[in-house]
Image (cartoon, coloured by chain):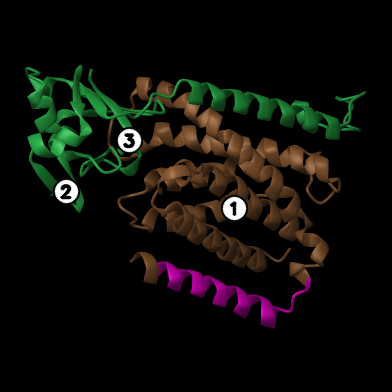
Amino acid sequence: MNRYRMLMGIVVFGTIWGLLECLIGGVPKGTGAMAHFPTGAFLAGFVGVGLMAGTRRIYGVPGMQVGMALVASVLRYFAPIGTVVICSALAIAAEGIVFEIILLAPSLNLAKMRKPVPLMSLGVIIGYSVYVTGYLFTQITTPIASGEAFVMADFISVLPLGLGRGFFAAVAAGVALPIAVRVKNLHFDVDRIAREHYYPTSTIVTAFCWAAFVLIFL
Amino acid sequence: MAVLRGRGTGVAKGMSMDRRLGIIAVLVLVFSLSALVYGILNMREAGDTVTINGVDYEWRGLEENFTVVKLNGHRGVMLSDLINDTGLEDPESHQYAIVGADGYRKTVDWNDMLNGVLKIDGKEVYFTTRVKQYFVRDIVEIEVV
């Protein structure tokens, strides 16, 4: 994999991820059933894991997903929806790291996994790990990062919430990961796309996302 | 990570990696669903009243009995006014735990109470001095710590 193609991929898919986080994560909680919709779990499980698994399958480069997560977290951090959203930004960065750590296991090679049930199982495991780690990580780091004291009683009280809401992330990722991995079946080979098409298209998509971000949020 | 090592590694003879993944996934789903059900069973109902320092206040009566202010567009009753109304002595020497119906809890100090409102619409708090994570929703109680 060409280094510059991979860097472009990090920027493009990280930007798309970040924009989706800002758009969906910034929607005010509604009333009725929508008030209880697990937006964070959906974003982590479906959008986050879906994009990370899809890009891992397409590019096949370990480490790339952490870069995407960092790009997405930068966008999320600067989206001034209501207030500073440092917790969401930290969660996204943690999600990318956890994804990479799990896929360090040599046998968990997305390129070699074909059957849907193991892929769904892996999605469930990754989705839950990614969401719960991100959720609990921000409960610890956000008070510290915003100059406040970490209160253990608060952390203990949110533990059952994080562990329970992770169920939705697990289910969402159990659906998203098999779909994302099958993107490769569309014969979408990044290395074979002519550079005259790859770089301009990537730049246009990135510029469009940033323009949309600036117009909507700044 | 060793548990995820698969066929051919010499570690996991007798059980394929696919089956291991399946078992772990089922365990994850059962565990998380249990935690979710536990949370739902322990959820307190965000009813007509909110308990502040042991005193029950009706949500509907807050607007009539307290001055309503706007902080950065967030309309509500000053949290410091509510605490003072409970008769708490020396409020600056205490901390305050804001507790939501789902058990979500955040502890703040007096300076935050001076810069925060209890929003009657949505039954949530807003602080000018804190980040979004502290904006507890469906509040049932404000405890003095």
The magenta segment: A192-214
Q: Secondary structure at mark 2?
A: strand
Distance from the alpha carbon under mark 2 to that under mark 3: 16 Å
Is A93 in the magenta? no
- Establish if B14 lies above or below A104: above
List x then y, in percent, for residue A30: 41, 49
Pinpoint the chain carrying mark 1.
Answer: A
Amino acid on which the number 2 mark rests in the picture = Leu
Circle 2 residues within 10 Å: few <14, some 14–19, many ≥20: some
Earlier-in-chain disc, 2 versus 3? 2
Residue A103 in view: no
Q: Colour of chain B?
A: green
Name the residue rendered at 50%, 26% in the picture.
B40
Quadrant of residue A106 in the image?
A: top right
* Of residues A78 and A215, the one drawn nearer to the viewer in this rendering: A215
State the predominant SS element of the stretch in magenta: helix
Mark 1 Cα within 10 Å, few/some/many (few <14, many 20+)? many
For badge 1, the amino acid type reads Val
Is A167 left or right of B109, judged from the image as shown? right
Residue assigned mark 3: B136
* Residue A146 shown left or right of residue A55 in the figure: left
Counting from the top left corner in percent of width and height, residue A180 is at 72, 55
- In which quadrant is the C terminus of chain A drawn? bottom left
Quickly name the residue at label 2. B71
Vertical order, A121 against B58 (above or below): below
Q: Which chain has been coloured brown in this picture?
A: A
* Residue drawn at x 69%, y 51% as measured from the top left: A53
Q: Residue at x 57, y 34 (%)?
A: A166
Same chain under badges 1 and 3? The reply is no
Q: Position of residue B137 (x, y in %)?
A: 34, 37
